[in-house]
Image (cartoon, rainbow, N blue to C red):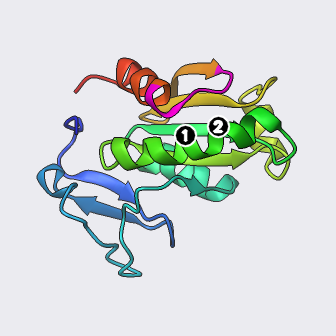
Amino acid sequence: MTAIQSDPALVVCPRCVSVNRVPVRRLDQHPQCGRCKQPLFRGEPIAADSHAFARHVEAGSLPVLVDFWAPWCGPCRAMAPAFAAAAQELEPGMRLLKIDTQAEEAVAARFAIRSIPTMILFANGHEIKRTAGAMDRQSIIAWADRNRPSS
């Protein structure tokens, strides 16, 4: 895990989207949400709506890797297991979200998603880097690590 710029880290709960303060040194100790008591990290991507997306990207201090996809997209469906497997390795130092571009058209339009799957890495509320096209697990992890903001 890479250190986060601030201590404590601001971690958005995947269930209730409340913001939790977690000491950076405790991120890998299975922290729970102070509000709903659910695990803050599940080792899997979070299917996010526009509200959850905004909370994770704008209120959390973890880098956020977002997979923009659609249910009718063959390459998106093919990449889904690899993205899920990447979450197991990238958490807790990075949050992984999935945005269904068909259900969340406004979010897709805001970020000018023209082809899917597209992955965008965010940090401190800003887009850091993007790439389009399906990848395998190892390629997703390598791309995320290569583009991760430095502490």
- Residue 133 can be seen in this image: yes
Q: Is residue 18 above or below residue 3?
A: below
Q: Is residue 14 left or right of residue 53?
A: left
Q: Is residue 23 above or below residue 1?
A: below
Residue at point 40% right, 37% down? 63
**Count of numbered circles in the view:** 2
Q: Is 80 colored magenta in this rendering?
A: no
Please identify the quadrant where the N terminus is shown.
top left
Query: Of helix, strand and loop, which one carries label 1?
Result: helix
Please identify the quadrant where the C terminus is shown.
top left
| Residue 120 disc label | none
Residue at point 54% right, 41% down? 83
- Magenta segment, which residues? 132-138
> Which residue is tagged 2?
79
Q: Nearer the viewer, residue 46 or 71?
A: 71
**How far across and how far down the image is residue 115, in percent?**
79, 24
Q: Is residue 58 left or right of residue 150?
A: right
Q: Amino acid at mark 1?
A: Ala
**How far across and how far down the image is residue 81, in percent?**
58, 46
Q: Amino acid at mark 2?
A: Met
> Which residue is tagged 1?
82
Q: Is residue 30 above or below residue 142?
A: below
**Quick one: label 2, few (<14), some, or many (20+) residues within 10 Å?**
some
Query: Of helix, strand and loop, which one carries label 2?
Result: helix
Verify CB contact (< 8 Å) between mark 1 and mark 2.
yes
Q: CA distance from mark 1 to mark 2?
A: 5 Å
Image quadrant where residue 76 sits: top right
